[in-house]
Image (spheres, rainbow, N blue to C red):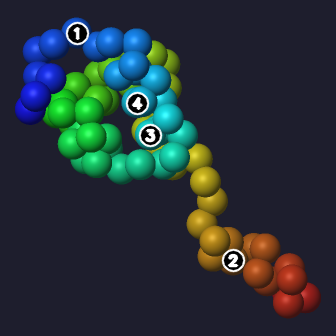
Amino acid sequence: MQNQGKSWTANDVQTLIALIKGNTPTGLIAFKLGRTEDAIRAKVSSLGLSLAPTNKSPYDRNFSNKKKGK
């Protein structure tokens, strides 16, 4: 990892936040930032953020059933 053991820059944090908002998988975030997945999880936790996806599945069954009158 290219940034392993290095401090997080403001640009790193901005990139991290943007990738989280884009629902990017943790492994890909780690790859793009040159850090380990554990480092990503630790930084996200220290920022009070979550890696849980924020978008809903396009296959929301409740919506589909309502649309069909079920």
Whether residue 33 is visible here, answered yes or no, is yes
* Quadrant of the drawing holding the N terminus: top left
Name the amino acid type tagged 4: Leu
**Mark 4, residue position:** 16
Of discs 1 and 2, which sits in the foreground?
1
Tell me whether circle 4 and circle 3 mark residues in contact (CB < 8 Å): yes
Point out the tag, 4 or 1, that comes first from the N-terminus. 1
The percent coordinates of residue 18 (x first, y second) are 50, 35
Binning the other alpha carbons within 10 Å of mark 3 as few (below 14), some (14 to 19) or many (20 upward) gives some
> Could you tell me if the residues under marks 1 and 3 are in contact, i.e. CB atoms within 8 Å?
no
Image x and y of residue 22, in percent: 51, 46
Q: Identify the mark nearer the N-term, 1 or 3.
A: 1
Question: What kind of element bears circle 3?
Answer: helix
> Tag 1, which secondary structure?
loop
- How far is the residue under mark 4 from the one under mark 1? 14 Å
- Residue 61 position within the rendered picture, expressed as x and y whole percent measured from the top left: 69, 77
Asked where in the image residue 13 lies, by quadrant, the reply is top left
Name the residue that disc number 3 marks: 19
